[in-house]
Image (tube, coloured by chain):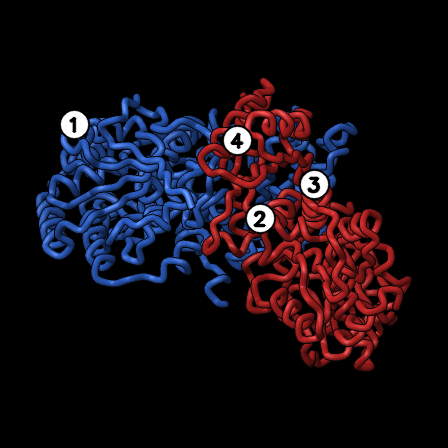
Amino acid sequence: MLKVCPKKNISEITSEAGKGFFESGLEYNPPARGVWNIVHTGMLIPEAHQIFVCARGCLRGVILTAAEMHAADRLSWVSVEEENMYDGTLESDVVDGVSEIIDGLEKRPRAVLVFLSCIHLFAGCDFEAALDELRGRYPDIDFTDCYMTPTMRTTVSPDVKMRIQLYSLLEKREVNKRAVGILGNDIPLEEESELVRIIKDNGFELKTIHNCKNYDQYKALSECFLNITFLPAAKLSGEILSKRLETEHLYLPSCFDFDELDSNYKTLCEKLDVDFSGVEKERKAAKQALKKAFSVVGDTPIAIDFAAFARVFGLARLLLEHGFNVKYIVAASAEQEDHEDFCYIKEKYPDIEIYSPVNVNMLYMPQTEKGNVLAVGQKAAYYFATDNFVNIVSEGGLYGYHGIVRFCEMLTDAFLNKKDRKRIIQHKGFGCDSCIDEV
Amino acid sequence: MKNVSKRISCYSADTAGICSALYELGGLTVVHDASGCNSTYSTHDEPRWFDMPSRIFISALTEADAVMGNDEKLISDTVKAAKDLKPEFIALCGSPMPMMTGVDFDAIAQEVERRTNLPTFGFSTNGMATYLEGASEAFYTLSLYFSEKREQRADTVNILGATPLDFGLNGSVEAIKAFLTENNFRVGACLSMGASLNDFRMLSEARVNLVISQSGVKTAKYLYDEYEIPYVCAVPVGKFFSKQVLKALEDPSEQVFKNGSGSEVCIIGEGIYSKSLASELLYKGIDANIISPLETDKGVLSQNDAQVYSEEDIRAYLKEKKPKTVIADPLYSFVIPKGTKHYPLAHFAFSGRCYTSKILNFIDREIDIQI
């Protein structure tokens, strides 16, 4: 067995923001399944039905995503054969297939998300014409265009695009100056987070897609006078929606720098036109939580992966500055927002090892001897073969000082208690139902 | 439309069939597709992924590389990986986008072979055919290349067509091996679970081949043509049918399957497995037939069996035939008429990880299905 792990000391990396640390090549796929895909995200629209039109090989992943989360009744499909690509029926197959499905459903959906794939876009399928035809046939149903186009990921990634299309069915309404939305996050923010509390404690109604119990409530999201995004992958969604609905948008990025957090809260308060009473108590609680966690975790080597938090280097910096022994980071690049923290770590902690998340040689990483490691994120847990890990993806609903306190509790718990790594990390869609837990 | 489904799943695709067939053989398999597309295979088509590392990778094809025909990236990335990982062979397979751009996998395979000196095979899969077709091509192609003329051994039987897509990881394939050994056969090659590349080299040692899924049929026909090894298509399920399989292995000219009209039980699934199970039920006095929604050799199906593929046609068939019980994967429940009993028998190639406890091992054991 070869043990050529694709790692670099951070000091060896001369990357610009957003540029890959490692040479591109063939890619390995580790069995950590917590990150949501477009099916999980689409399921957030109540009373909506998803219809995928693509090849069998692409269908398989989306059908079984829905089946595993007990939502097979909310997804249908039309399989594409080779001849369909050349016989001039590209658009009519979409229209006829989707129509047949709608006509046969036991319950009429309020909305239909139609997903096309890479080959449709490559073949120049007139998606809008197909949707117009469907809108004419079914005036009681809202249709939107969605995309399973991973080949096109270097322009707008399917993940970013899905977060845009998730709100594409919202229409301009009279805005409610007391309603605020938080958009684009798969996992709802914890109620105790300062972001939620500032909105609610000042008498504003917080609207999120997670709280919508029916399609009417979803449509009412467009009443928000202000929409907030905090994930990089959701920023464009917030910008596009606000422009389209002529509402306001604030991007208050999830981060680990205390001054940046304070600035985010001040910006929000100004926009809400409420007093900013400060978050000294919360800041102090976060510092105490870090101190307390360090007293338990000590110098245990820590590995963090990029799927756990958008600002993986920001988290690493916070932990390093509070004494923790962050030794390994699994990440392919440092994105623009995270680049300053990357540069800081590179200068101050040049021995930190950076591992590629997908390089072929990572295949054998779990079999290499690394001693006891405390992992943050599912991919780190898999690659460093540790049952002591924080089970988290895509921020896991954490934000701000409260998020740091909660993270410290989770880190301490992960240090003290082992988890069933194989079962937990293979659960598809963090926080979603899963039938594989029942076997 | 025949290619529309409101609720039921679809079977694994050809690319997954190739990856599954080659998984344990020490090769390097590259799927030419976008980054992330390998998660479908590694999550839903491959139960060995967590515990048994295998060199199955994706080329991370981008729009620009597809449009510009940048085959060199696939070639050089494959060569580099081969240098690091030192596989015994290389397999390259396609997906929908390479089909659209007309990628010549045979030519790319030749170039990779020239640069690596490793046997390299190109498979023009497009993600639109079934896993059986992909696995079939993989078994056949490697048999063609690696099988050697060897002295036949009178006691040896090969097992052809074994992948977790059809048999899961519930011990069925091991049970087939044990069943053969207990009945005085020597198990030769097993294509390809619990196997190595050497299994392909010793294929010609067998006196007879036992084909346990459609994916082994093409190889069996090749081995018959090339080495005159006869074959029997059957899975030794149940206490009665397994004895018939033994007889057929002794005398492959003997008809192994029984045929029924399906008035009591209809089984939906892979042809050879389903027909074997139906035969066991018929030996027990239960009238059974099968619906095969997958390609199935003509010699397997009788005129009372049905080869229908779409959700709509399966539903219509069951509505017309009105069997008392349908034995099928749990994800078929939506098409089973009200009042008809559904006995859940999961099939990994259909429902993936959803119902692994219902992928049952019926090999050489009493089958007690209440109809």
User: Which is more N-terminal, label 4 or label 3?
Assistant: 4
Q: Secondary structure at mark 2?
A: loop
Chain coloured red in this rendering: B
Q: Which residue is mark 2?
A: B25
User: Which is more N-terminal, label 3 or label 2?
Assistant: 2
The span from disc 2 to disc 4 (Cα, nearest Å) is 17 Å
**Subunit ID for the residue under disc 4:** B
The span from disc 1 to disc 2 (Cα, nearest Å) is 45 Å
Q: Position of residue A42 (x, y in %)?
A: 50, 45
The span from disc 1 to disc 4 (Cα, nearest Å) is 35 Å
Label placed on residue A347? 1
Q: Position of residue A78 (x, y in %)?
A: 68, 43
- The picture quadrant where one finds residue A420 is bottom left
Query: Which image quarter is the C terminus of chain B in?
Result: bottom right
Q: Position of residue A19 (x, y in %)?
A: 35, 24
Q: Position of residue A308 (x, y in %)?
A: 32, 44
Q: Which residue is mark 3?
A: B145
Which residue is more in the foreground, B80 or A415?
A: B80
- Looking at the image, is B154 positioned above or below residue A255? below
**Subunit ID for the residue under disc 2:** B
Query: Which image quarter is the N terminus of chain B in?
Result: top right
Amino acid at pointer 1: Glu
Q: Could you confirm whether marks 1 and 4 are on the same chain?
A: no
Q: Residue at x 80, y 54 (%)?
A: B296
The span from disc 2 to disc 3 (Cα, nearest Å) is 14 Å
Q: Could you confirm whether marks 3 and 4 are on the same chain?
A: yes
Q: Colour of chain A?
A: blue
Q: Which residue is mark 4?
A: B78
From the viewer's perspective, tell me whether residue B160 is left or right of residue A160.
right
- Looking at the image, is B269 positioned above or below residue A352? below
Q: Residue at x 30, y 26 (%)?
A: A336
